[in-house]
Image (cartoon, helix red, strand yellow):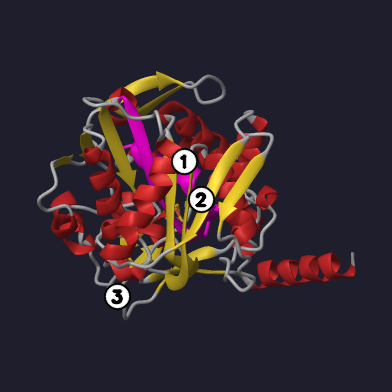
Amino acid sequence: METVLIQKGRYDEDEIRPLVFEMLESLGRGLFSPGMRVLVKPNLLMAAGPEEGIVTHPLVVRAVVSYLLAREVRVQLSDSPAVGPFARVLRRTGYTAALEGLDVEVRPFEKTRSVDVGPPFGRIEVAADAVDADAVVNLAKVKTHTQMLLTLGVKNLFGCVVGLAKPQWHLRCGIDRDQFARLLVAVYRTVAPCLTLVDGIIALEGQGPGRGGTPRPLGIVAAGRSAPAVDAVLCRLLGLDPTQLATHRAAEEGGLLPPEIRVRGDFHVVDDFVLPRMAPATFGPPTVSRFMRRHVLQKPVVDTVRCRQCGQCEKYCPAGAIAEAPRGVRFDYERCIRCYCCVEICPHGALQTLEPLAGRLLHRLSNLRARRD
Ligand code: SF4
Ligand code: SF4
């Protein structure tokens, strides 16, 4: 039976350190031995302040690193932020200050290793540091995700796919949400973290996982050895049936869900967590007809007042569908595959999704039908 711990917590070093030590001691017994090389993988999406609910909080990371150092392992902390440079991300997120004085090697993922994950994806390039580590500790964040509903433990490891390879995967295999979820699960299986801890003390609700979302204090930390089990429990805590999450369905399909999960700690249902407005279940050129793209799927739109014309979205877009405009940016909606990577990574929160009239009507109809059934 798999155990998932849920504990109440606050971002106060005197509180979070003993809390994290207790959780890891209870779950991690026997996992770490002196001299092992342990990789810590937080969610460092972008240069955002710790209070914004976008990155794993630096005090949580400090507590986990301190625990590992106390086990006499060699600790490395790495990620591949969507928007760099890495040193700036570390400063802005508070990691530079939080990790000061700790014997931890901090560097971005750079080198990759080609790993055969089997059909349908074949070989994928994953961060060599993640594949080569003796153990990986996954430090995720509770956030909504415009494309995948939520990003929790399993999705956090997509950060081990380095740099611009991430949006390229959206283009190459993101035919539909379930297929993309299978890729996420393949990455999870490859990296195989021995522990997953998810920071939900300040979560992100609404149009996450970037600056389009809204910080939402939940006051909880969740942890377990199995990320799919932790995610399933967090779904229930947020008032969702876990099968609503594509990564849950993919993990179940891949035989990664434990048959029984025991929840220990302070589980309470949050029934007013604001989920993102979701596009229909398919996206990407092979399955999305021109009609669907034009009239039903949500499209990215720019707030020209907020846009600073930094060029990050143009650089990141896998479809080459964004160009600079006299004010803000211009989208080529015929090329856009509706992956919403641009909305996720805009450092100034200038991008949102807009649902066309036909899409809104369809949503309303399906809600009415669901209520009638
Ligand atoms: S929309 Fe955002 S990412 Fe794109 S240019 Fe404007 S500020 Fe930069
Ligand atoms: S414009 Fe945005 S949503 Fe469209 S393909 Fe590019 S990154 Fe994805």
Q: Secondary structure at mark 3?
A: loop
Mark 1 Cβ inside 8 Å of ligand 2: yes
CA–CA distance in space, label 3 to label 2: 23 Å
Image-quarter location of ligand 1: bottom left
Foreground of the two, 369 or 231: 231
- Where is 275 relative to 28, above or below? below
- The amino acid at mark 2 is Ile
- Point 52% across, 60% down: residue: 146
Task: Determine which of the numbered discs, if any, sits on residue 327 in the image.
Answer: 3
Q: Describe residue 240's horizontal placement relative to residue 82 as left or right.
A: right
Mark found first going from the N terminus, 1 or 2:
1
Q: Nearer the viewer, mark 3 or mark 2?
A: 2
Q: Residue at x 33, y 50 (%)?
A: 316
Please provide the residue range marked out in magenta.
Answer: 134-162
Check disc 3 and give the amino acid type.
Arg
Residue 9: horizontal and vertical position, in percent?
Answer: 41, 64
Q: Amino acid at mark 1?
A: Leu
Q: Earlier in the sequence, mark 1 or mark 3?
A: 1
Between 69 and 98, the residue placed more toward the observer is 69
Proximity of marks 1 and 2: CB atoms separated by less than 8 Å = yes
- Residue located 28% across and 44% down the image: 67
Q: Is residue 172 above or below residue 216?
A: above
Q: Residue at label 2?
A: 337
Disc 2 residue: CB within 8 Å of ligand 2: yes
Kindly report which numbered mark, 1 or 3, lies closer to the viewer in this rendering.
1
